[in-house]
Image: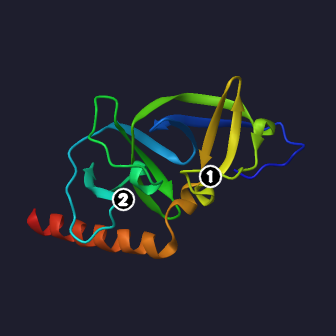
Amino acid sequence: MKQDSHSDEILQIVSFHVGSEEFGLDILKVQEIIRFQQLTRVPNMPSYVEGVLNLRGKVIPVVGLRQRIGLERQAPTPTTKIVVASVKSEVLGFVVDSVSEVLRINSSSVEPTPRLGQVSQKYVAGVGKLDNRLLLLLDLDQLLSAEESSAVAEVTNVEAAKAAAAV
């Protein structure tokens, strides 16, 4: 979400809530948004990985965004969703408390990331100003380190192989 101060580019952002904060993702990163469903827990995964799901034959790791940004895990509610998105060369699911809407914002209304409290600054690409609210724009490519991505992918590949062998 890098911006040029002279740019009037319109960004399309999927907005969602995690805890009391409103976040946004570039719509081009989002593949789909699905209702929360039961996940298969995988042993030895980091605490922020809630499990894996089978999405049309593909095993996808699902990250609890609450845990990843330092909030406490919460039981799913009727509004809980999984945002399926592209992260680097992987497809991951992210559990969010609710999905709000698709917004169109001018890139000139995005400010650089200020010092943030509960949310690590490295995960946030910028802050979008919308009327009377602020939208934290997530940088999914920074959400997991290279080592974390590799660990998640490795376990997912093992689970995919088990699923294929069971068929």
Helix, strand or loop at label 1? It is: strand
Q: Quadrant of residue 6?
A: top right
Q: Which residue is mark 2?
A: 48
Give coordinates of residue 166: x percent, y percent: 9, 65
* 8 displayed left or right of 40: right
Instruction: Identify the residue shown where x is 60% and y is 37%.
Output: 13
Is residue 59 among the parts visible in the rendering? no
| Picture layout, residue 30 above or below residue 145 | above
* 158 displayed left or right of 23: left
Instruction: Identify the residue shown where x is 40% and y is 55%.
Output: 92
Instruction: Identify the residue shown where x is 22% and y is 50%.
Output: 39
Give coordinates of residue 112: x percent, y percent: 75, 49
Q: Earlier in the sequence, mark 1 or mark 2?
A: 2
- Report if the CB atoms under discs 1 and 2 are less than 8 Å apart: no
Marking on residue 149: none
Give coordinates of residue 23: x percent, y percent: 55, 40
Amino acid on which the number 2 mark rests in the picture:
Tyr
Is residue 154 among the parts visible in the rendering? yes
* 48 displayed left or right of 141: left
Give coordinates of residue 154: x percent, y percent: 33, 74
Q: Residues within 10 Å of mark 2 (few under 14, many from 20)?
A: some
The answer for how far apart the CA atoms under marks 1 and 2 are is: 18 Å
Q: Quadrant of residue 19?
A: top left
* 69 displayed left or right of 164: right
Marking on residue 124: 1
Q: How is the image coloured?
A: rainbow
Q: Residue furthest right?
A: 6
Residue sitting nearer the eye, 131 or 73:
73
Q: Residue furthest left?
A: 166
